[in-house]
Image (cartoon, helix red, strand yellow):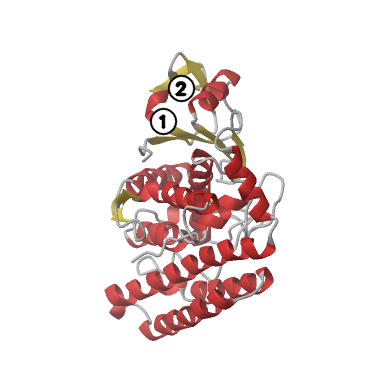
Amino acid sequence: MKKLLNTLYVTSPDSYLALDGENVVILEGEGEKGRIPLHNLEAIVCFGYRGVSPGLMGGCAARGISLCFLSPQGKFLARVTGGVHGNVLLRKRQYCLSEDRQESLAIARNCILGKVYNARWVLERAVRDHEMQLDAQRVKTASGFLQNSLGRIAQCGSPEELRGLEGEAASVYFSIFNELILQQKKSFVFHGRSRRPPLDRVNAMLSFVYTLLTTMTASALETVGLDPYVGFLHTDRPGRVSLALDLIEELRPVLADRFVLTMINKKMVTAGDFTQKEDGAVLMSEEARKRILTEWQMRKKEVITHPYLEEKVEWGMVPFVQALLLARFLRGDLDEYPPFFWK
């Protein structure tokens, strides 16, 4: 099992990263802001445009360290990868199945079953723990709809039908998401998903955390030898990690959405951490991003029991486990891809 190492998040837009021996050096202005041994890192995520040295890029590629660039607002820009490695037969099998409509549907269907199942679990958990603080009947009605959707998703016969059912379930889930915000309700109001740009504080946080989850999942897929750019549900598009987007579907509700709700309900973020531009886009402050990243790293270290393996794993290892299970299915070791059904 892969050891969960640390991710270095460089949030200052004025920082430049370089390689000095076996260390990554963070430079800002005329001085050195810090240095970290490469052997302690599994990924580096940079928020800014100054970039890194070619030497560090090569060093990360040689050591299998993911190097990802995001805009200061958290929008994905690029990832640096080294030479293609891993099992070529595994990747050929992945490419073959991605061109097969029915084989792709079977994998995509399981990903969406995991997503809807976990979304329903989030609603049921909220009613169980906070019944007096929310409109329990509305939440239970939405949960019932998601329960009924599971049967229709399991029986759907085309990618188009699957996307329609997934969109319908997501619409119902997000229609009552505002009920799950128990604190700071006047400052954090959610009317539905908005992206590119996010138009409220909740969406700004969701988009940011989804980006973190996608980056982590893309690295997990490369670790097991799969191509993160060739998916089964999300269509291929230059620069889009389609397979990573497939796999994060089942993890969005239980890992990303619950994390954002915790940050709001525990008042770890406040209205003062956000600004609104003239075009309506809502941006997080650098301090808020740092706070979220710190808590995200802590959440990744929490230990759970994986529902399929029935073994103790850290939350941060779940994308790696799911990537490994997908690889095992593609190799023929499993009859189907087992999605993450949180219990």
Q: Which residue is mark 1?
A: 41
Nearer to me, 149 or 174: 149
Is disc 2 surrounded by few (<14), some (14 to 19) or many (20+) residues within 10 Å?
A: many
Give amino acid for label 2: Val
Quadrant in which residue 33 is drawn: top left
Q: Decide: is 56 above or below 330.
A: above
Count the labels in the image. Answer: 2
Q: Are marks 2 and 1 in contact (CB under 8 Å)?
A: yes
Nearer to me, 253 or 304: 304
Give amino acid for label 1: Leu
Is disc 1 surrounded by few (<14), some (14 to 19) or many (20+) residues within 10 Å?
A: some
Q: Which residue is mark 2?
A: 24
Residue at disc 2, secondary structure: strand
Nearer to me, 293 or 226: 226
Q: Decide: is 83 above or below 185.
A: above
Residue 44's spot in the image, x, y percent? 48, 33
Residue under the point 28% across and 73% down: 129
Residue 293's spot in the image, x, y percent? 41, 44
